[in-house]
Amino acid sequence: MAPGSSRRNPRSRTSSSTEANDGGEDSIGKSKPRRRDRNKDQNSIRILNVDIKILLGISVLAFFVILLLIRNLIIRPAGKAQRPRVITPFPSPKLMDLPQFQGEHRESLYWGTYRPHVYFGIRARTPRSLVAGLMWIGVKDGMYHMRHVCQDSDELNTYGWTQHNGRDFGHQVLVDQGLKLTTSFLKSKSEGSGYGGDWAVHIDVQTDKPELDNEMLRHGHLFFYLADESGHVLSLAGDNLDTDKNSLLASGSRSDIGDWQLHLKSKEVLELHYSGFRTPHIHNLSDLVQHNLGAQVRKFGQMLLSDSSEDSPNILVFQISASIPFKADIAFVSGTKVKTSKVKERVSRLTGASLTSLLQDKQTEFDVKFEQCFNVADKLEPDSTIVGKAAIANMLGGIGYFYGQSKISIPENSSLRGHNFISYWPAELYTAVPSRPFFPRGFLWDEGFHQLLIWRWDVHICLDIIGHWLDLMNMDGWIPREQILGSEALSKVPEEFVAQYPSNGNPPTLFLVIRDLLDGMEKNKFTATESKGITSFLERAFVRLEAWFQWYNTTQKGKEMGSYYWHGRDNKVTRELNPKTLSSGLDDYPRASHPSDEERHLDLRCWMLLAANCMQSITQLLKNDNKPEKEYGSTAKLLSDFDMLNQMHLHPLVGAYYDFGNHTEKVRLSWKETRVGTRELVREVLEQPVPRFVPHIGYVSLFPFMGKIIPSDSWILGKQLDLISNSTVFWTDYGLRSLSKTSSMYMKRNTEHDPPYWRGPIWMNMNYMILSALYHYSKEDGPYSDRARVIYDDLRSNLIRNVVRNYHQTGFLWEQYDQKKGKGKGARLFTGWTSLVLLIMAEAYT
């Protein structure tokens, strides 16, 4: 169609045609005015006829549109308006529907310690599960305190898994002041078992300090509970529980596992009490138990459950009291209604000496597999090996299963304004977590680092977890960066931090593990069955990974070709020294002082190169159509262009890489009086910002080094080694600090209430990536290989020594480490990416 023409104006085309056919003269050129008038009349009639036809056509069209609307109103149920894109699932087959995740694999992972936020908890991988858990009464400062949910305020001396295989076994030690508990978990599948099999818990209660004559520590009080999230009624074995005569505590029935029974056995003299509750939620179970105990203390002066139950209870809590030390075995058996279920034999096998033997076998299997996977026997001292085992055990023991709906913030320009958020579709997530007490939920960028460990232990669990994450993708290719699913997860997060923002991303670290898997297949690290599973996984995942890549490549791209910037920074802040970049994962790491679309974020550019390289490798593996391969290849070529990288991000005089943006260094926080007579810290800008490099040397500056983009013979590589080994920039005796001491933001608070986070302390995930690059360059031919090796050896030794020392002194792995004295900081029991210390011990890099 010619420019300016339009199908919406047929009359103009008709008029033009009529004018061309108007005859003003006869064949001999004489005027015929009457003929002209007659022609005009005929043309007018033609035009009128056309207009009538058009009107009739529009009327018919309108009729059908109205009919269609009426039909939709009749057929579509009330409230079923078209779903907004942001909460519409990605339209492709789900990864979790792949055959490799069905059958035996699915059943083998059905039960597990999938409640990482409690000290000990069991559930099934199903939305509304039968849930089990343990509470106990601890003593602190001469007072009794209930222990249930992992929280720092409990001040346990130590707790965590010392062994866990991610599937059917775990051993945990908890030291609570003078009380020491060990909890061991075992799964068993035998003849007669229902779906998912049976499981057992061995609990050993000791006095950690027997020399103390403390009356309060002479008796132990445990509370083991079962709760049915579906609301099914749990049946008590009897009003007077006596395990000497009958080990049965409770029974019930579910559609997934059939009839089931819970048994308790012990050689010690136990005092048992119980209480039953009816409630749709279990996140407040601690309160229910404490309220019941409190009422009993006030009435009878005894800290014992009431031996009563609400009608049709879906929660049963059993108090197990005895003189310390004592042991108890709890066995859960499913499929008990079947005549061939052999309940008695199965309970006997999962208690007493038989259970002890089975647990010892599993402990031995764990130790053997640990060495097979990480091969550290010749590299580590015994103290370091203990920490390495704790690292992988807590990573696997911290895997959780969650079900619920994310809350999504509604953009300001949305037609849905008037609501604060909109709910994502109901979804499940099987994932590792960064920290059981502080972050017991899924975090997108953490998960890529977690899987660097997990794939080396069990590639099937790894693929299962990645599949769950990719199935959370919406039709735009976006995945919410923090997953707060279900009432238990929501109970741990302040309301203002719950909503997720669909304009904001997170580092696509899942490509780190995908790169590892591709590399592993190329080097024959997997069995034929494992390689086949990885390939079929990538075949189905490809369309989602492609959409994920395109989401970043379109929504996060900058103004200049090959540039990117993290969205979500607030350019209107008045109380932050430097507006946070939460979407980058590096939170308060200093960026341009004035956020804008002019920014160029170096780390995101390098993440995009990793993603493009992975996508190209996948297309080659799958032998897909050449077009996407060429597209990813051209993107990778563009982002790996060393000259372009240097033009956009390198300060040639300093030899350091920087972000770019609208920036001034003259920003500070100053105390200001408020209208109500109080003071607050407010941001002050003392000069106009200008487009420039952001002159802060820190982890972001090393991303081209981490990505191994710098040629091994480049002088710039030498400069990076200078910066890394310089004690005023990165180097400390405990690891590499996150921000140079020369930075104006070094160890500065970002607000009155936000201490420095990524502005100095040592983080294990970044140190692991830097070590990986040092290891790479030490193997490459070039003038800097020997120096890279020396720095690598020293840094690796410093990191291992400091983490091991802290673990044995404090009983925990920590979120970060102080750059001055090496002391653990932030969240303790941070067994997410700090567990990468094991890969550093094993020298396991890509």
Image (cartoon, rainbow, N blue to C red):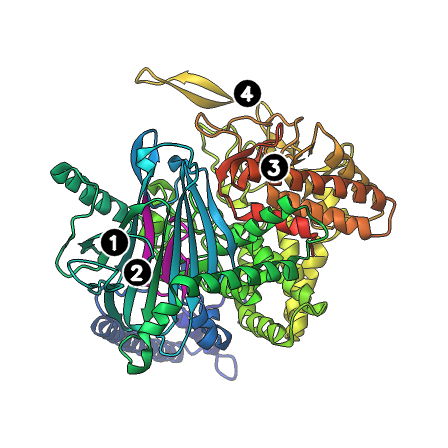
Figure quadrant of the C terminus: bottom right
The residue under the point 22% across, 73% down is 70
- Tell me which segment is drawn in magenta: 111-136
Front residue of 665 and 704: 704
Where in the figure is residue 214, as x and y percent of width and height? 34, 32
Q: Which residue position holds label 2?
A: 264
Amino acid carrying mark 1 in the image:
Phe
Q: Which residue position holds label 4?
A: 686
Q: Earlier in the sequence, mark 2 or mark 4?
A: 2
The residue under the point 54% across, 65% down is 463
Residue 805 badge = 3
Give the alpha-carbon distance from disc 1 to disc 2, as whole Å: 10 Å
Q: Can you name the residue that lies furthest to the bottom here? A: 27
Residue 350 badge = none
Marks 1 & 2, CB-CB < 8 Å contact: yes
The residue under the point 70% across, 70% down is 524
Q: Secondary structure at mark 2?
A: strand
Q: Which residue position holds label 1?
A: 318
Q: Earlier in the sequence, mark 1 or mark 2?
A: 2
